[in-house]
Image: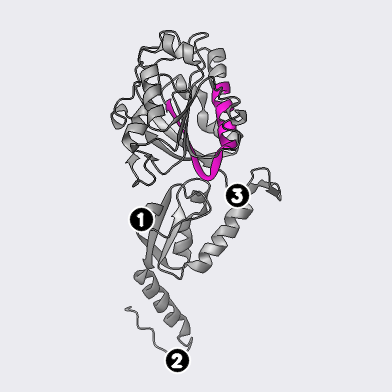
Amino acid sequence: MEVFSFEKKIKHYSSYQKILLAGEGDFSFSVCLARAFGLAVNMVATSLDSRESLMLNYSKAMSNVKELEARGCKVLHEVDVHSMSQHPFLIRVCFDRIIYNFPHAGFFSSERNRLQIWFHRDLVRGFLKNACEMLTAIGEIHVTHKTTFPFSEWKIVELAKEVGLYLVDEEQFSLLDYPGYENKRGAGMCDKTFHVGMCSTFKFAKLLYSSTTSWSGCSGINGPHMQRLHQNFVMGYLNSSSEMHRASYPFSDWEMEKLTKEVGLFLVKEEEFSPWDCSCAASSFHPGTLTISLWSVDIVDMACSYLESLERKKPKHGHKNLRPP
């Protein structure tokens, strides 16, 4: 077996990441990643179906499972997302990426029916709660989901907040990014694909601090007292020329641009930052969406301030009024 291999990537995923795939249908998405990586020794792919039901419901499932196992992927059957964190094989394992594509609770009624939506939300809530317990400190949970009505009524971002997760990013999903992936229905006509339409991959990560920690009635890192504390720190730092800062909520509430104006700086440029650009940029926290903001001294503002100071220094008496009549 190959001991070392160079990193290989496909879209959001890397062969160096430990990846868990939940709710796989015919395992075609897992195979897509495995083929991109060459080896799949860092992957665990799971399905709610038993091995026998896979053979009955999906025409390519067993060939996909065999390919995954040949590439070193661990394949687990009969794994319920509501309790997967307690699975004997998964109970002591943490992952950098946990993926659930197009979660669906099965058909009980019309997709617009409130009871049907409740079942879907319960499924996603159960998954997120368990996935949160299996995530590394800087890991992400990815849920690919339709964004049109009535699927938008699932409100998965709201469900994530309930279990202590925040939205890192939302990116439009395209089947073209994952060659070989076949999005099977998984209920009813299992082996048939469904129309994807408008959908996104929602990326969630753990909050840095517990949302239950309170101070003066304000909760955790989202509280105004914490925002003001961070703002005071930034104000003291802005004598430097640049600042690396997280762009997502709640960090966006620091109002960086407003703070810089207070100390006579203006925004020259804002660029997206990636830790991959710096070999020494390893950190113990989840970076999320980062930007590097480049600041410069506002020369016009400085000149105006200087002229105002000269005006204030002029003696009040003994000088002629130089203004035209």
Task: Look at the numbered disc 2 and give the secondary structure of its residue.
Answer: loop
> 37 left or right of 105?
left
Q: Is residue 242 above or below residue 119?
A: below
Q: Which mark is residue 221?
A: 3
Q: How far across and how far down the image is residue 154, in percent? A: 51, 24
* Mark closest to the chain's N terminus, 1 or 3: 3
Q: How far across and how far down the image is residue 218, in percent? A: 66, 47
Few, some or many C-alpha atoms within 10 Å of disc 1 (few <14, some 14-19, many ≥20)? few
Quadrant (top left, top right, bottom left, bottom right) of the N terminus? top left
Furthest residue in direction right, as rendered: 216
Question: Is 155 or 12 nearer to us in this picture?
Answer: 12
Few, some or many C-alpha atoms within 10 Å of disc 3 (few <14, some 14-19, many ≥20)? many
Q: How far across and how far down the image is residue 278, in percent? A: 38, 58
Amino acid beneath label 2: Gly
Closer mark to the observer between disc 2 and disc 1: 1
Asked if labels 1 and 2 touch by Cβ distance under 8 angstroms, the answer is: no
Separation of disc 2 and disc 1 at Cα?
63 Å
Answer yes or no: is residue 215 visible: yes
Quadrant in which residue 73 is drawn: top left
* Mark closest to the chain's N terminus, 2 or 1: 1
Closer mark to the observer between disc 1 and disc 3: 1
Separation of disc 2 and disc 3 at Cα?
58 Å
Magenta region? 122-145
Separation of disc 1 and disc 3 at Cα?
28 Å
Q: Is residue 104 above or below residue 200?
A: above
Question: Is 9 or 312 nearer to us in this picture?
Answer: 9
Quadrant (top left, top right, bottom left, bottom right) of the C terminus? bottom left
* Mark closest to the chain's N terminus, 2 or 3: 3
Q: Which mark is residue 277?
A: 1
| Disc 2: which residue | 318
